[in-house]
Amino acid sequence: MAIPADPDTREQSPRDTAVQQMPRALREEVRLVGDALGEVIAEHGGAALLADVEALRRTVIRARAQDERRGGYTDAADTLVSSWSLDRAEQVARAFTCYFHLVNLAEERYRARVLRDAGAAGPAEALTNALATARAELGDEGLDALIANLRVHPVFTAHPTEARRRAVTSALRRVGDQLERLAELRSPDAPPPETRRRLLEEVDGLWRTAQLRSQELQPLDEVRTLMGVFDETLFRLVPAVYRELSAALDASDTGARLPPAPAFLRFGSWVGGDRDGNPHITAQVTRETMLIQSEHILRGLEAACTRIGTGLTADSATTPPDGRFLSRLRVAREIVGEGAAAIGTRSPGEPYREFLLLVAERIGATRRADLSLAYAGPDELVDDLLGLQDALAAAGAPRQAYGELHELIWQAQTFGFHLADLEIRQHSSVHRNALAEIAAGGARSLETEEVVATLRTVALLQQRLGVRVCHRYVVSFTRSADDIAAVYALADRACAPGAAPELDVIPLFETIADLRNSRDTLDTMLTLEPVRRRMAATGRGLEVMLGYSDSAKESGPVTATLALYAAQADLAAWAAERSVRLTLFHGRGGALGRGGGPANRAVMAQAPGSVSGRFKVTEQGEVIFARYGNRTLAQRHLEQVTSAVLLTSTPAARQHTEQAAIRFAALAQTLDEAARSAYRDLIESDGFSEYFAEVTPVRELAHLNLGSRPASRGGDRGLASLRAIPWVFAWSQIRLNLPGWYGIGSGLAGASLDELRIGYEEWPLLNVLIDNAEMSLAKTDRFMAAEYLRLGSQPRIAELILAEYDRTIELILAVTDQSRLLEKRRVLSWAVELRNPYIDALCHLQLRALRALRSGDALDADRRRLEQLLLLTVNGIAAGLQNTG
């Protein structure tokens, strides 16, 4: 199943061009895994199965290559797919799904290899350029102040958008290990027999691994999945990011000076804490989540401390310790007690080694909750490590002081003893109802009892592990300051007569109305005594969250983008007027229809003054593994975001965005009004909700078991209560990606083309809005989407959608001065071009299942098989498009 050029076309097709433009190393690896998969398919299902896969592959490629005759080839594909038994259709769907998994792996490996090769030449170019710009504007002192207050804060969520099973991810990792062995041998064309055998073994393992989850994910399954990212990537990645920033700040340092980069990264998590609409997240789950996190980070710190300590063999003769360090060593021996003697015996004349191994012993005791040896908290550990560092530096061993030991200090400062700040989220209505029930004095609902139990659990976690582990409480759909006051009131009542936990209650503004009312809400918040107390303790710090998903679902991408931008600008001005140190928390989804897209460009498009050296953002579902699953790619992502935060925090960047926002205010209003009207006309059309359910697989998505959270809030199946993730996911499956672009064409049509072109060049927000819409549209297919739209009983809605589709593409091409989508982004263009026919193949299989299911004629046994086929194609299309919701 490799990707050769189409042999059946006389003239070169776009696909042929894309194959030729693919870098040779990537092309060879794709061919290698494709051939291996083809061999495995033939072994499993015989030559006939491989022939069926190839027949469908060639048919859909011909359809793409000869566009004017595509309808005929599409009919041929439908006829072929319909001729198969459901069992054979499933096997073919599995083949294309596995193929996309393998191609995604090859592309990920290629990107990582390119970045590693570039990194060998020196610090990341983005960081170096950002620091040079900031230094030129701010001077050395200004840059030092910016770096000292720098904070990049990703928050991982359990939003159900990762379609792959963890078993599939593990199988792919093993395939990647074999590809790495082949790369080291540099013989992809003729791999040694044993290496080829191992590659085939692992590809065979992937083929035989169930692609679909048979059971619903439980919350602690989601927690353990996330722990894999920390264990395999983030723990070791963090020091590498800090090293890169240090090298960019001081290129002359060779390791003999204190690295200038502070521990500016912090990680948060909603996994096990986000209970908004998810009854499976209980107080017990939250408690167990934090214990799992603590166990993982303490094991990581203990192992790193033991490894570094074992190698720290500087002796007293070459590196004489001073009195302060010897005093610290005596205290450590006394604390560890009997176990200290054995460590001392293994470290004769090596006081630094002995000390660090004693520290490792105490970290282990902390993990085991042995209070006689345990550290009181991470600050005490960091103090010991800094004491050791100072002693080594004073003894003339700066390379020992500022090498791996400093990386351990960075890790302890970043992760603490809890790994990631666990954040609680709950809907505002739950708190209002709970307060009313408690005030009434009668029987309490299970929901109210759970709120009370959660707040008590937060208090217990803070008592055991410190306030930092869990102190943020996000209130979704915040309407007024009363919603914030309710949480504090509930905390007091839940924990009485004891002390309530220290809470930073964070308003989450999600609707357009709430965004526009946010300033008034915050003004009233500042009058609340618990808020004033927390602000005094945090240097007048305040956090506000902005929701991208629901605002976009409510009013469309244009109105949501402009409303969020206006809210950011207004809140930044509000904070400056009141001397508030504001952190905006961006609730961005992975898909473009939920505020997703390249993170560094999103930072650059923020409103003036809204970043100020601090950026906090959610990382959701498949985005977590795309951005953090590979250490090299994760480092690149964090470096790019950091660079963008630095650049956006300079006076010139602020001035530029301020002037652009003023210059194009009238244009923004024109776009907003027309785009919102078009979007609302669509979703308020009679029968739209039913039509959406007919033409997309939204009903069936819940059976994918993507996560523990239900697809809708409150059990209602209407469009209003449907969460943004299945809304976006369903449209992506039918090749429309409607939430990422609908209304933009109408908005652009009402504005001057010349003004749009100027705005596209000069205003980062408009540039990102149009580029994201272009990227979203590039992953669509009008011809295939029309097939899905015919499944519905509302041709007028289909006509409305396709007319806006055509209008949007035409005007985006006009504004960007292109003849086709992605014309100026060749790498992305050829990647989409090569994937499209294979996604078409899965769409034909999915359409077969959907047509039969929507007809209502299938027998119960066939219906179950059809749903299985449909879900398998959903998985494959998500892999091919590389996004879900």
Image (spheres, rainbow, N blue to C red):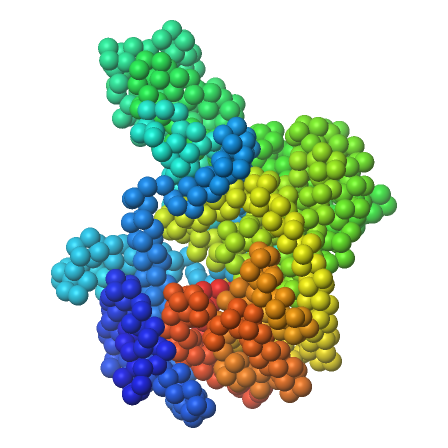
Percent position (x, y) of residue 697? 56, 75
Closer to the camera in the image, 748 or 206: 748
Q: How many marks?
A: 0
Residue, far right: 440
Closer to the camera in the image, 779 or 491: 779
- For image coordinates 26% across by 18% down, the residue present is 314
- Is 219 displayed left or right of 483 in the figure? left
Percent position (x, y) of residue 451? 70, 45
Residue, far top: 323
Percent position (x, y) of residue 569? 68, 48
- For image coordinates 32% across by 41% down, the residue present is 122
Percent position (x, y) of residue 62? 36, 86
- For image coordinates 51% across by 24% down, the residue present is 379
Q: Quadrant of the N terminus?
A: bottom left
Q: Is residue 338 above or below residue 370?
A: above
- Is 37 displayed left or right of 144 in the figure? left
Q: Let me know if residue 525 appears in the view.
A: yes
Q: Quadrant of the C terminus?
A: bottom right
Q: Is residue 39 above or below residue 491?
A: below
Q: Is residue 719 above or below residue 621?
A: below
Closer to the camera in the image, 876 or 386: 386
Q: Indicate the quadrant where residue 565 lies.
A: bottom right
- Is 531 displayed left or right of 816 in the figure? right
- Is 716 displayed left or right of 527 in the figure? left
Q: Is residue 361 above or below residue 74?
A: above
- For image coordinates 50% across by 56% down, the residue present is 598
Q: Let me know if residue 726 appears in the view.
A: no
Closer to the camera in the image, 299 or 760: 760
